[in-house]
């Protein structure tokens, strides 16, 4: 690999804004996170932090708090909305 052209790949903490949960992983966002000035302490060590809007700790699919948007089937909704049209199908 050529020196000086690759981004730094180091430990970064990702923090969920809505729950406050922190996940420590390696990322190329280490330089950008350190430049923004945010840090967080995890297990006695300080890491740059990247704030995220949604993570598995707050996403409705993973938390089980998702809403059911379609209480009736799609076909039934279509039939109710448009019904069976006279003429039996395509026009020539």
Image (cartoon, grey):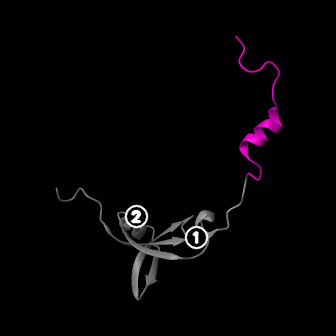
SS of the residue at dot 2?
helix
- 73 falls in the magenta region: yes
SS of the residue at dot 1?
loop
The disc at residue 32 is 2
Give the residue displayed 81% in from the left and 29% down from the top: 84
Give the residue displayed 58% in from the left and 70% down from the top: 17
Q: What is the x, y in percent for residue 43?
A: 42, 87
Q: What is the x, y in percent for residue 77?
A: 78, 42
Q: Is residue 34 positioned above or below 69 on the image? A: below
Q: Is residue 76 positioned above or below 66 on the image? A: above
CB contact under 8 Å: marks 1 and 2: no
Q: CA distance from mark 1 to mark 2?
A: 18 Å
| The furthest residue to the bottom | 44
Magenta part of the chain: 70-92
Give the residue displayed 80% in from the left and 18% down from the top: 87
Around disc 1, counting alpha carbons within 10 Å, would you say few (fewer than 14), some (14 to 19), or many (20 or more)?
A: some
How many circles with numbers are drawn on the protein? 2
In the rendered view, does 14 fall on the left or right side of 7? right
For the C terminus, the image quarter is top right
Q: Is residue 10 positioned above or below 43 on the image? A: above
Give the residue displayed 17% in from the left and 59% down from the top: 3
């Amino acid at each position: 690999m050529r020196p000086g052209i690759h981004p730094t790949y180091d430990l970064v903490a990702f923090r969920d804004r809505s729950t406050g949960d922190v996940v420590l992983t390696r990322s190329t966002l280490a330089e950008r996170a350190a430049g923004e000035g945010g840090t967080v302490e995890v297990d006695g060590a300080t890491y740059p932090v990247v704030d995220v809007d949604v993570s598995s700790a707050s996403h409705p699919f993973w938390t089980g708090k998702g809403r059911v948007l379609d209480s009736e089937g799609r076909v039934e909704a279509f039939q109710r909305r448009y019904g069976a049209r006279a003429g039996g199908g395509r026009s020539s």
